[in-house]
Amino acid sequence: MSSGLTQQTICKLVGITQPTLSDLEKGKSKSSAKLPELAFILGVDAYWLATGKGRRTPKEEFDPLEREFISLIRQLDDSGKRRLLAQIQVIVDFDGKADPAHSKPLQ
């Protein structure tokens, strides 16, 4: 499986062990409750990952960095998501409006 992420990173994001990931890759294990999250991180369709049938890629595609962001965001509670959203909005609003070398870091 090629996602641009290391096995260690994939396992951490999905919440599985490296032996579990290896077993899924080699076909030793055919299913896991984590298949939907694994498919998302890998950027493949969950049905295809589980069965080898259908479309390999999902209809909506994200690059590896976007998938990593989304996976981490899903681990936050609502309060954490709201705080992160506010921080992202500050970055987006600030982007290009001033010289970043003279800006204060976000806290």
Image: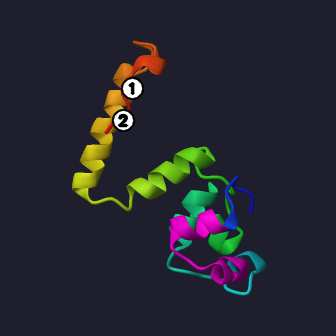
The label on residue 75 is none
- Residue at 33%, 59% in the rendered image: 76
What residue sits right under mark 1 in the picture? Answer: 92
Looking at the rendering, in which quadrant would you find the C terminus?
Answer: top left
The label on residue 88 is 2
Q: Which residues lie in the magenta part?
A: 8-23
- Residue at 69%, 57% in the rendered image: 56
Residue 84 relative to residue 63: left or right: left
- Residue at 27%, 37% in the rendered image: 86
Residue 35 is inside the magenta segment: no
The image quadrant of residue 102 is top left
Q: Is mark 2 on a helix, strand or loop?
A: helix
Give the answer, above or below, for where 44 lies relative to 105. Answer: below
x, y percent for residue 77? 27, 60
Residue 72 relative to residue 107: left or right: right
| Number of residues whose C-alpha sits closer than 10 Å to that of mark 1, classed few (under 14), some (14–19) or many (20 or more) | few
Q: Is mark 1 on a helix, strand or loop?
A: helix
Residue 26 relative to residue 50: left or right: right
Give the answer, above or below, for where 48 lies relative to 97. Answer: below
Mark 2 residue type:
Ile
Comparing 92 with 21, the one in front is: 92
Disc 1 to disc 2: CB gap under 8 Å: yes
Q: How far apart are marks 1 and 2 (CA)?
A: 6 Å
- Residue at 68%, 83% in the rendered image: 19
The image quadrant of residue 29 is bottom right
Q: Can residue 76 be seen in this view?
A: yes
| Number of residues whose C-alpha sits closer than 10 Å to that of mark 2, classed few (under 14), some (14–19) or many (20 or more) | few
x, y percent for residue 16? 55, 77
